[in-house]
Image (cartoon, helix red, strand yellow):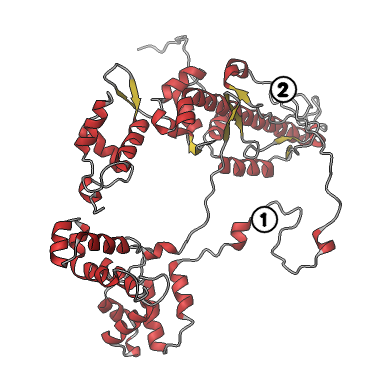
């Protein structure tokens, strides 16, 4: 074959660095976005944080790269649902204005009035001071037990045994290792025996939280019962049930339980009520780990007879171009310093424009979600409508992948609580009248039916499916079982109890 030149025409999507940056910012959560902005501020001297009260805080993020005017992110104003169409256009000429309060704080420092030696208190300019991280103990169950261990007199051998026992206790408070394994792990020079290990274990079982260091559920519950006052009603009966008939209680075989324990129904009911006050996971009482925060990206509130959607002003970083450095850029200058400033000025404007695009896209999507799920906001989960990504994508004129990025790790604050945007999306089930019913609403109905059931005769999955069928909702029994498990609702055999 002879080599030839062929001219072809075609279309392809090119992922420019600016588009890649916009997509990356779009899928970040509020906390991750703040970290991304902080890194951008450290890397680009042309970017700076904008103060809320600055008069030059504007939204001209789309100005030409050669322009020397400063740029900043504009936050959309609150949007009423009856004016969604008007909100679709970005207000590029908006300005950031705030009223000066009538009463300004007096120029007096706390130290001028009160003397304090607490160096851990925040200063006026310490924006990174975090109360939880400075005051939280971060205590684990092991550290809590070791702290109590140091308060009791023990020999060196017993202390080493206790440390080994504490290391073998899991987060729920149970001793996972056998006493034989604990003994074999000790230094032979200690010359300890199995009886001494068990003796130290009994000492640990007197620690807080009550029931800790138990080897199984029976021992855990008995430890808690033994520490109750002797005059506690039905205490002895509860001990007898736990010690001898725990399996029957777990299987809810109340007929056999009454026969073998020789208790009447009302006595067994009271004994079980006492057992239910105990904690089967005593280790959970000791909080561990760092605090986790959820910052809502969007706030939804009711104003008269309409729902208003607005961005959370506190969660959106406010950045702008540094006027001082931007004024140094000269268009005709090709020096290295000027090229450096020009490139960073262009990157700063691209970054600001990406932030503005993220805010506008998030606002459009959240507004459409609220418009679609008015019933949930007004009546609760049972009024949730079916909603898929394609519905919102078609409404705002974007691709489904974009909607997926916007709704991931983004949270909406509503009068009914804080929800991830993905929460409002659910599949549908057909009704007998030809309509559609949201799977979220079906879960709410299942929860409602189970809450109102007769504890002596709890509803089976088939019975729940039949009750929904009477309301015109066709749901298979296996689907009911799947929804029930997702709600952490036990099967009917495990929900049965004496009343």
Q: Which residue position is annotated with label 1?
A: 129
Q: Evaluate whether residue 176 shows in this view.
A: no
The residue sitting at 21% across, 45% down in the picture is: 457
Image coordinates of residue 28 in percent, x first then y, are: 54, 38
Classify 55 as above or below 138.
above
The picture quadrant where one finds residue 181 is bottom left
Q: Nearer the viewer, residue 419 or 417?
A: 417
Q: Is residue 8 above or below residue 357?
A: above
What residue is shown at x 38% (from left), y 11% (from top)?
A: 2
Where residue 84 appears, as percent x and y from the top left, is: 58, 18
* Side of 247 relative to 128 (left or right): left
Report helix, strand or loop for mark 1: loop
Q: Position of residue 466 (x, y in %)?
A: 21, 31
One can see residue 408 in this view: yes
Residue at the spot 72% in from the left edge and 22% down from the top edge: 63
Q: Who's the residue at 39% across and 65% down the image?
A: 283
Instruction: Using the rendered view, name the quadrant where residue 246 is placed.
Output: bottom left
Which class describes the residues within 10 Å of circle 2: few (<14), some (14-19), or many (20+)?
A: some
Q: Which residue is mark 2?
A: 63
Left or right, 52 with respect to 260, comes to: right
Circle nearer the N terminus (1, 2) = 2
Q: Position of residue 376 (x, y in %)?
A: 45, 29
Residue at the far right: name it: 107
State how many labels appear.
Answer: 2
> SS of the residue at dot 2?
loop
Q: For the residue carrying disc 1, how many other residues have a C-alpha within 10 Å: few (<14), some (14-19), or many (20+)?
A: few
- The residue mark sitting in front, 1 or 2, is 1
């Amino acid at each position: 074959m002879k080599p030839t030149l062929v001219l072809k025409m075609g279309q392809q999507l090119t992922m420019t660095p600016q588009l890649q940056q916009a997509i990356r910012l779009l899928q970040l959560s509020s906390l991750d976005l703040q970290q991304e902005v902080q890194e951008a501020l450290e890397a680009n001297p042309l970017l700076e944080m904008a103060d809320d009260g600055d008069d030059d805080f504007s939204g001209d993020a789309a100005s030409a790269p050669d322009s020397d005017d400063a740029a900043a992110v504009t936050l959309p104003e609150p949007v009423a649902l009856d004016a969604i169409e008007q909100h679709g256009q970005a207000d590029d000429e908006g300005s950031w204005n705030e009223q000066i309060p009538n009463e300004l704080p007096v120029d007096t420092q706390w130290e001028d009035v009160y003397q304090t030696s607490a160096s851990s208190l925040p200063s006026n300019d310490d924006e990174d001071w975090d109360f939880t991280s400075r005051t939280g103990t971060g205590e684990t169950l092991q550290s809590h037990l070791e702290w109590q261990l140091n308060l009791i007199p023990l020999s060196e051998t017993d202390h080493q045994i206790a440390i080994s026992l504490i290391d073998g206790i899991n987060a729920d408070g149970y001793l996972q290792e056998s006493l034989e394994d604990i003994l074999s792990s000790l230094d032979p020079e200690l010359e300890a025996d199995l009886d001494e290990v068990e003796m130290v274990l009994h000492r640990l079982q007197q620690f807080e939280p009550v029931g800790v260091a138990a080897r199984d559920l029976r021992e855990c519950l008995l430890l808690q019962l033994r520490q109750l006052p002797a005059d506690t009603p039905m205490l002895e009966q509860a001990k007898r049930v736990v010690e001898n008939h725990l399996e029957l209680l777990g299987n809810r075989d109340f007929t056999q339980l009454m026969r073998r324990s020789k208790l009447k129904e009302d006595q067994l009911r009271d004994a079980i009520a006492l057992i239910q006050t105990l904690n089967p996971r005593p280790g959970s009482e000791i909080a561990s780990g760092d605090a986790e925060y959820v910052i809502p990206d969007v706030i939804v509130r009711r104003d008269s007879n309409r729902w208003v959607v607005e961005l959370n002003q506190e969660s959106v970083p406010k950045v702008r171009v540094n006027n001082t450095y931007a004024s140094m850029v000269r268009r005709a200058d090709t020096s290295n310093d000027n090229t450096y400033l020009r490139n960073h000025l262009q990157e700063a404007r691209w970054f600001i424009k990406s932030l503005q695009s993220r805010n506008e896209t998030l606002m459009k999507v959240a507004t459409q979600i609220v418009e679609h799920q008015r019933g949930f906001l007004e009546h609760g989960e049972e009024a949730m409508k079916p909603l898929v990504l394609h519905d919102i994508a078609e409404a705002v004129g974007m691709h489904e992948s974009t909607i997926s990025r916007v709704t991931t790790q983004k949270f909406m604050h509503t009068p009914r609580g804080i929800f991830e945007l993905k929460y409002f999306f659910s599949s549908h089930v057909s009704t007998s009248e030809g309509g559609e019913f949201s799977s979220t609403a079906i879960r709410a109905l299942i929860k409602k039916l189970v809450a109102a059931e007769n504890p002596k005769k709890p509803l089976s999955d088939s019975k729940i499916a039949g009750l929904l069928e009477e309301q015109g909702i066709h749901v298979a029994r296996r689907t009911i079982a799947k929804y029930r498990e997702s709600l952490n609702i036990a099967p009917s055999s495990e929900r049965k109890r004496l009343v």
